Amino acid sequence: MNVTIDEDKCCGAGQCVLIAPEVFDQREDDGVVVLLDAAPPQEQHAAVGEAAAVCPAAAIQLTPPTP
């Protein structure tokens, strides 16, 4: 899976960081999401999918990996 984020949409709720801290972090100054791994390993896919699903701003997009 490929992960992209829309920083302009991010409201800094931090749910993604709580659910998948290996993939997401937050900026100290404003809480906006920081993407740590745009192509997380298979074992992270369920957590990343959950993070995208619960994001209140729909700032996380998931796409299939590029062959």
Image: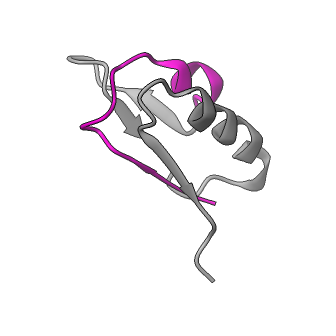
**Residue 36 seen anywhere in this rendered image of the structure:** no
**Lateral position of residue 48 relative to residue 15, left or right:** right
Instruction: Give the color scheme: rainbow, by chain, secondary structure or one colour.
Output: one colour
Q: What is the span of residues highlighted in magenta in the rendered image?
A: 1-21
**Lateral position of residue 56 relative to residue 10, left or right:** right
Q: Is residue 9 above or below residue 67?
A: above
Question: Which of 28 and 6 lies nearest the eye of the viewer?
Answer: 6
Displayed quadrant of residue 52: top right
Q: Hey, which residue is sitting farthest left in the picture?
A: 29
Q: Residue at x 62, y 34 (%)?
A: 53
Q: Hey, which residue is sitting farthest bottom in the picture?
A: 67
Q: Residue at x 47, y 23 (%)?
A: 56
- Residue 2 falls inside the magenta stretch: yes
Q: Is residue 14 above or below residue 59?
A: above
Q: Is residue 31 above or below residue 55?
A: above
**Residue 8 seen anywhere in this rendered image of the structure:** yes
Displayed quadrant of residue 41: bottom right
Q: Residue at x 23, y 18 (%)?
A: 30
